[in-house]
Amino acid sequence: MLLDMSDSKRVLLSGDEAVALAALHAGVALGTGYPGTPSTEILESFSEIGGRAQWAPNEKVALEVALGVAFAGARAMATMKHVGLNVAADPLFTAAYTGVTGALIVVSADDPGMASSQNEQDNRHYAVAAGVPMLEPSDSQEAYDFALRAVEISERWRIPVLLRLTTRVCHSRTVVHPRPANPPPRTPFFERDIRGRVMIPAYARLAGRRLRQKLSEIQAWNETCPLNRVVAGNGSLGIITSGIAYMHVREAAPEASVLKLGMTYPLPVEKIRAFAAGVNRCLVIEEGDPYLADAIRAAGIKVESQPEMYRFGELSVARVRRILAGDTSPEPSPIPGKPPQLCPGCSHRNVFEALHKLDCIVAGDIGCYTLGVLPPFEAMDSCVCMGASIGVGLGLRHVLPPEQARRVVSVIGDSTFVHSGITGLVEMVYNPPPTGHVILILDNSTTAMTGHQEHPGTGRTLEHEPTGKVSFEELGRSLGLENVFVSDPSADPGKFERLLQDCLANNQLNLIIARRPCLLIAGKIKEYERAANQTCTAALGEPE
Amino acid sequence: MNDGVINIVTAGLGGQGVLKASDIVADVAFRSGLDVKQSELHGMSQRGGSVSSDVRFGREVFSPMVPSGVADYLVVIAPDQIEVNRHQLRPGGMLIAPDAVDPAKLTNKKSFNVALLGVLSRHLDFPEAVWLEAIRAAFPDKLRAANVQAFALGRKAV
């Protein structure tokens, strides 16, 4: 059904699935990324419908691989959640300088309201800071259309394009009419372009100027391009908006004139100026930071913006009505539901029981195990970003008085360790604290929190096929660590607790791998292994 | 604005099939040629916490989220989630609570979510055949019969 391209066909897709379908129709040669809510389903769906998709160890690597694909003249897509773009920011900023030969779409899925994130950062600022065009869809149809457009813009101006989604766009299912596909991509071919792609200062100075020239051309194009449109209203109230906020605005203010911006960097300033001049009262309504309002005011256009209280959390029809009414009274707080918790029988429970009992100071990390912060364990003292458990734990160890320092443990999941923990492990070996340290990898053999994705430590690809496998214990030993332990915390909780206690007391560097597959996925892992063995047997032929 | 749009909220706990039930409702409206929007939040909800999903359908739907106090129907799978979600209903809106169906009569207890859809189906203007198509499309072969049975049970229960 998904592959049917005729105009009469309609499909009900999430924003993530719509981006995947567009990637397929656009001839994207490779999609790569790191799992992160709400972006994860893009690559899973792309793989399911026949696209080539890979999980990378982290977003930086994903974007670099995608850049290589685009240097080779093919079309590439890198997907990540908002905080993932922080990790990938290094290649992003300079990829804007080098530009691309094929197409490079960077999908950033932001999480206003923090349904499943550690912060509420608004990645529209990245488009400005890096100097890459940005498209903001408001539903699945636009997610599909804008992804196709992003490929066109990327190829036409040879520049990476940021496709900025938000949770409600990613995870809402709405009707999509697939359109005729983009012209087919060129056959990948290496054309040398040393001055264009080798960013030594002499060449980068020229590249920076080329980038600004491209952006100025794109801005001129954006003034009249169909990505931005006006919904005519009665002329007294005008609203400038983008993304999901557009939908809430249409429902809350059906009589208003609306300028719906699809391409929000570089902004179509003259179009905005003309719109604002044509209405009595012009208001900017946007989810997150006052990105549009600040930019529009900086261009000397008089607009009202929403009160500060509405920059926090998601917008909704009710909140837009309050904004329109100038209502800044306290909002009713939602009735609290049941919070999530570690599954009954999860081996993380045994670990956090031990950490709690030994009164450890726990530098935590991002994953299911972050739930160890909640009662009854309350055994986590910090959680900042992917991999921070190790650096933060080491920092605490360096300066705390010895009796406190000896209680510090860095707790990190397997996928998170691959993502950003390996450099932390190297730091521990290179700059050991006086009291030693304990790194505890909670290895449940999957990226559990985001829905059980594979990673380099599982030895299986995105499609659950066998591939190279990173061994954490071998990695630790190769760095010269002598105290490397593998333990199943559920098999013998008492033994695990004693191991942890010994490590805390020994003043040395310790790597403990608490290994037990996530119970939600243990059965599936056995299936993957059985399938892999069968393929292997078939390839070798039946024994005579 | 949003004239004739029907708003349905499905709520329960992670693992109860809240999203699956909501998917089926959206699919029924979609198969009937209507504009449909369905909104749900994944992520932390997978660990046994509160989950809810909104479905809105009609001639043209804007926001994917059902505004508080506007739901025409509230389908709740977990008894302790009724009070958490009751504010979603409009005055005169209908609560379909878990006691609407006797779980002992189900072939497969996991199909309780679909049984409650059977109850809901009596109040919506879609042919039974479309519901059955959507249910069959939503499950693998081995789970179809149990879910069709659950749906029939709920539809009769009204």
Image (cartoon, coloured by chain):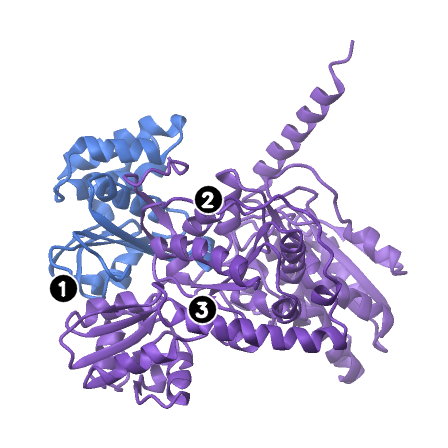
The tint of chain A in the picture is purple
Give the blue chain's letter.
B
Disc 2 secondary structure class: helix
What residue would you read off at disc 3?
A114
Q: Residues within 10 Å of mark 3 (few under 14, many from 20)?
A: some
Chain letter of disc 3?
A
Instruction: Single out the mark in the foreground, 3 or 2.
Output: 2
Disc 1 secondary structure class: loop
Inter-mark Cα distance, 3 to 2: 31 Å
* Above or below A242: residue A307: below
Inter-mark Cα distance, 1 to 3: 29 Å
What residue would you read off at disc 2?
A25
Chain letter of disc 2?
A
* Above or below A151: residue A463: above
What residue would you read off at disc 1?
B1
Q: Which of the pair A216/A420 is nearer the observer?
A: A216
What's the amino acid at mark 3? Met
Q: Residue A454: x, y in percent?
A: 62, 47
